[in-house]
Every structure is written in structure tokens, then in C-alpha cells.
Image: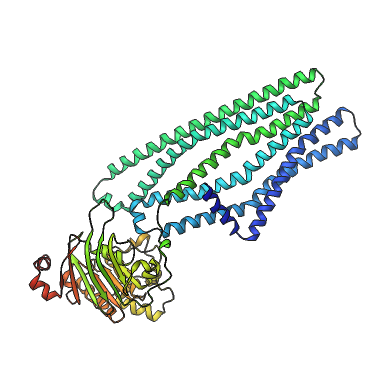
Amino acid sequence: MFALFNKFYALFWHIGSSLKKRIVLGFLLILITVGCNLTAPLLLKAFLGSMANHQPCIILLGAGLGYGFIWSLSQVSSQMREIIAFPFIQRLVRSIAMQFVVSLHDMPPSFLIKHQTGRIASILQNAREGSEALFSGILLYIFPIFFEIFLVCCVLVSSLPASFTFIFVAMIAGYSIFSFWALGKTRHLQSQKLEADEAVGAYFFDTLLNADTIKLFCTQNRTLDHCDHLLNASEKAARRAVSFTESVRIAQGVILGITLLSLSALSIFCFQKNTLAFQDFVLVNAYFLQLASPLNYLSLILKDIKEGWIDLRRGLDLFEGEVGESTLMATESPTDLQSIEFHNVSFCYDSAGPKILDSISFSLKCGEIKALVGETGSGKSTIGKLMVKFFEPTQGQILINGRDIKDFSPDQIRRSIGYVSQDSSLFCGTLLENICYGNPLASQEEIEEIIRKASLETFLQRLPDGLMTRVGERGLSLSGGERQRIALARHFLTPKQIYIFDESTSALDQETQKIIQNSIFDLKKHGSVLVISHRLSTVTNSDEIIVLSNGRIQGRGYHTTLLEQNTYYASLWGDP
């Protein structure tokens, strides 16, 4: 809790001076509003007293106008404080949202393996909205309400018999204690509702991502049944939360009703004994109505604050215990990457799980082209991901220029190593934006050269809008081969010292594959290339072919040598 408030305090001091002035002005308006709310009933009492005592018209007019002016000023200042303070609150919410975004993008790929994308999006959206409700409630409502209650009690003590103050204090204490007790139950029910809603959102997101698979397997009914099951759970959780909330409001209304009856009975008793004037009775009722109104929506505000706190905590808890990549930042970076070496590297995703890689050793030096081949699940792609620091080795060392890869930052490693996966994702923009994503300052000549290397000329000629064609969500308007060629062009346009191509031509026809294969081999002039492939025909000209099986190296050498000496490689070559 203390660490969280320290974060908010730090965010406050990083906000611009103009917004700090707004929050100071907002607090001044709060003081004006509370002062007007405190003064208005007193002026009303004076006005009624003047009428009862048949004061001159000028005094009545002054008292009446004063009461009207103070009441109007209270309403205006109440609204103005929100207008003045709202930009500050929004900037604070924006800063918190950016902290979440920074934390999210700082997470390693293993974070996304453990959490559903839809659930992450839902939690962070709720956290953003919750932080707004939290700060608005505390700054604009809770502080003014309790400050006003304190001052009203002080006025009552000095103006009326102590019994009236006792009733007011008992009302406020009983109302507050009951409201805080109810919040505990509300928090539990609201957490259940949020979990149910997040499950619905995550499932919706998952079904949208896999809509084609659902249709192909004709599982719409099963999908809808499960969706209905999740919605039913969400409905029940919402009903329980709303029913309890409304019951709490009824009980709070009863507390206010009992208070009003007590004040009325006491006023009648005191009036009969001539210890209370009728204008004092009006003052008591005016303060009661003035406090009853904020108390009546106090529970709603506390509920919003509590929900906002829950949402914000869930967002913070999402990253609890996670190690961000920024913690791995080092002072040095591989400015001239000459070699990368694996020394007895082993890896597993879970300490209790099976080894994906087992004692892998090989090197890749500048000007070399090497290939990794093997059956599905042999660990080929994992080696590529270890090279770009998506994961850390469980055992062994990865050396860059003879130094441990841990000495270098992930960001600088990825500036030197390009990784093209089999299923490259595209942004929902134009073809030009996707191709130039890694090098937005590329010249027209460079773009045209890369289009030729990625064999995209014919494809672009068929498009009316050419490079300005929008690719749609994740590039789904394109074929698999078209997406792969755009992903290759994006990496060709971004100079690297090592390129890793992980099944990056698997969706291409043989003729296009040969063109791109030549482009890949041309990269040897500028650095190193590691090709990961099932198609052995694409790696026959490599300087060394490393054969993997079950996470271990089963052989290495030239293509012809392996065909003659390695029966496992020969079986892969003969397997269509």
C-alpha cells in the first residue's frame, strides 16, 4: 500500500505546473463550496428570524438576497471545481495508463504465454477506468463531504442543544460504519462479477481470433453453449452484486429516516419548552437535508472508489512478481556483432517440465550461413528465440563476441539480430507502413529494391492502391505467402548483423522461394544468416547444417557429407 502511494506521489510531481495550479485552484473551490454550504442555512435562519421580528424591508431584502447569492455560489463553485480539477485527474489517469502500457511492453514473451490476451486487455481497461473513478471520488467528493460534516458538527455544537449534535454524530457514525461494512461484502461480490466479465471478454476475444477454426470444425453450437455458460455466470454475479447494493441503499434510507424522525421529535419537545425557536428548527432541517444528500450518494461514491481500487489493484497485481526486460538492461551493447556461440545450452519453459533443448553447442560467425533442421518440436525455433533474448537459457551460456549475452540489453541485441518467424504478424495499416515499420525513413529507391528482393512486384501491380492498400486486422486480407513476403521485406529493409529466418518461406511456391532464397543468401555479404527450415532443399548450400532431434544435436556438416554419414538426416531428406 505504501509503495503504491509513493508511485502516485511521484506521478503527481511529474505532472506539469499548469495542472498543479489547477488542482490547487480546485481545492480552493472546494473550500468555497463547503463554506457556502455551511453559511447558507445560517443566512436562512437569519432571514426567517428577521421576518419573525418584523425587521425593516431593507434588512429582509439583504438577508434574502444574501441567502440566494450564497446558495447560488455554492452550486456554481461545486460545478467549477470539477471543470478545473478534471484535466488534472485525466492527466493522472493518463500517466497511470502509460505506466501499464510500459510495463506490458516490458514483459518477456513468457508473460503472454501465461495470460490470455483478452484477459490482459480487459484488466488494463478496467484499471484505467477504475483509476479515474478512484481519484475523482477521493478528490472531488470524499474530502469535501467529510470536511463539510466536521464543520456542520462544529456549528451545531455552538448553536443548538447538545442532543441535536449527538443525533447528527450518531447518524453519521452509524451510516459510515454500516456503509464501510457493506463495502467489504460489495467488494467480494464485485470481484466475482469482474472475474466473470473478464472470462466472458477473454473467451469472446479468443473466439474472434479463431473464428475460421470454429467454422471449419463446425463447432459453433459448442462455442455458443460455452459462451452462454459464461454469460450465465456473469449474469448471476451481476444480479447478486446489484441485489446486495440495493439492499444496502434501503438500509441507509432507513438510517436517514430514523434520524429525521428523531430530530423532528426532539425539535417539537424543545419548541414546547421554548428552548428552540422555529428558525432553529429550519436550521436543523436545512443541515439535515444538506448532509443527507451527500450521505445518500456517499455509498455510491464509496462503491465506485472501492471498485476503482479493486480494478487498479488487479492491474497492478497482473505484473506482480514478473521480471521486466528493462531490469536486464546493461551499460554495454554489441556495436559490432562478429559471432554468437552456444555452449552447452539447455532450456525448458517450466522447471518441472521437459527439456526443450539439451546441451546445445554451435557458433555462428560473421559471413556464415548455417541451417537448423529437424522434426517438429525438436527445438529449432527455441534456439532462434534464445538468440534474440525472448527467453533465458536454463543452463549453459550464449556468448556474443565472446561475452555472455546477459551482459547486453535485450533492446540492443534485437537491434543487431533480426528474427523472421513463420507466422509473422502485420499491423492494421497499409502495406507501405508494414514494410517500413523497422525503417520509416527508408528512401523510395530502397523500398523499390526491397520489393524486388521479396518478390512483391507482381502482387503489388494487381492492387489498385498499390503500397497504400490496407492489410486489415493482423493482415488477414492477405494470403499466408503474401504475409510472409511482406514480413521478409520489412526485415530486408532494416539492416541487421545477424538474420534468423524461421520457416519464413514455408507458405511460398517453389519459384518465389528460389528468388527469396537468393535474397537471403545475399545477406551473407553484410552479416550472418541462420535458416530454420523443414524443407531441406532450401538449406543445401549452407556452410553448415545442424540436425536436431528431441532437443539434441544429432549431426552437423555439409549437405553431401550428412547424406553419406548421417542416417537421420538422410531419412529427413528422403521424407517428402
Q: Is residue 247 left or right of residue 435?
A: right
Q: Is residue 29 left or right of residue 297?
A: right
Q: Position of residue 460 (x, y in %)?
A: 33, 72
Q: Is residue 58 above or below residue 411?
A: above
Question: In percent of the image, x 41 and y 73: which residue is there?
Answer: 439
Q: Position of residue 281 (x, y in %)?
A: 77, 26
The residue closer to the viewer here, 554 or 514, is: 554
Q: Position of residue 191 (x, y in %)?
A: 45, 39
The residue closer to the viewer here, 164 or 211, is: 164
Q: Is residue 215 left or right of residue 435?
A: left
Q: Is residue 380 above or below residue 57?
A: below
Question: In percent of the image, x 50 and y 50: which residue is there?
Answer: 128
> Residue 402's image quarter?
bottom left
Question: In percent of the image, x 43 and y 57: which residue is there?
Answer: 104
Q: Is residue 333 above or below residue 345?
A: below
The mark total stands at 0
The residue closer to the viewer here, 528 or 332, is: 332
Question: In percent of the image, x 67 and y 46: which residue is there?
Answer: 79
The residue closer to the viewer here, 332 or 95, is: 332
Q: Furthest-right residue in view?
A: 56
Q: Position of residue 45 (x, y in %)?
A: 80, 32
Q: How is the image coloured?
A: rainbow
Instruction: Name the image quarter holding the C terminus.
Output: bottom left
Is residue 533 at least partly visible in the picture? yes
Is residue 482 at least partly visible in the picture? no
